[in-house]
Amino acid sequence: MLLVYAILGALFGFVLSRSGAADYDFIQGMFLLTNFQLYGIIGVAVALTAPGILLIKRYGRTATGAPIVIELKPLHRGNLVGGVLFGVGWAITGMCPGPILVNIGEGKVYAIAALAGALIGAGLFGVSYPRLARPLGLPPLARGTGDG
C-alpha cells in the first residue's frame, strides 16, 4: 500500500509542477492579480473534488464496511488567525505544504528554508496551543491517531 501512496504522491507532485501550481512567479502573479491561471486550477480542483466528496459521504465505506463520516470542523477565531498566517506565509514564500515538497524535488534549494519555516511554525503552534486556546476560543486538542 505504501508503494501506491508513493506513486499517487509523485503523480500529484508532477501535476503540481507541470500546471504551474508550484511556480513562485505564478503564485506571486495570483496574489498580485496579474496572472489568473492558478485561480482556474483551484476552480477545477473544487469542481472535481466537490462531487467526489458528496459521493464518498453518500456511498463511501471503510475497509470494515462502516460508513465514512466527514464531519464539519467548528468555526472559531483561530480559523481567521490561522488563515491569515497561512496566506501570509504562502504569499511570502510562494509555497504551501504540497508545493514545498515539489520545489525540493525540482532541486530548488530555497524551498528547504520554506520547509524549515513550516516545520518550526507547526512545532511552535503545538507548544503554544494551550496558551492560545482560551483567547482564540480553540477547541480542545485531540490526541492520538483517531479511529483510523
Image (cartoon, rainbow, N blue to C red):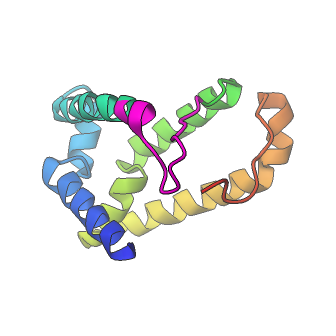
Residue under the image location 48 percent in, 57 percent down: 63
Q: Nearer the viewer, residue 61 or 93?
A: 61
In the rendered image, the quadrant that contains the C terminus is bottom right
Q: Position of residue 17 (x, y in %)?
A: 19, 56
Q: Nearer the viewer, residue 20 or 2?
A: 2
Q: Position of residue 72 (x, y in %)?
A: 58, 28
What are the residue bounds of the magenta stretch? 55-72
Q: Position of residue 88 (x, y in %)?
A: 48, 38
Residue under the image location 33 percent in, 76 percent down: 3
Farthest-out residue, front: 65
- To which quarter of the image does residue 29 belong? top left
In the rendered image, the quadrant that contains the N terminus is bottom left
- To which quarter of the image does residue 83 belong? top right
Q: Is residue 71 above or below residue 2?
A: above
Predominant SS along the magenta part: loop
Asked whether 69 falls inside the magenta stretch, the response is yes
Residue 43 appears left or right of 146: left
Q: How many marks?
A: 0
Residue under the image location 41 percent in, 49 percent down: 96
**Residue 139 is at least partly visible in this image:** yes
Q: Is residue 111 above or below residue 125?
A: below
Asked whether 136 falls inside the magenta stretch, the response is no
**Residue 109 is at least partly visible in this image:** no
Residue under the image location 19 percent in, 28 percent down: 34
Q: Position of residue 97 (x, y in %)?
A: 43, 54
Q: Is residue 109 above or below residue 38?
A: below
Residue 91 appears left or right of 89: left
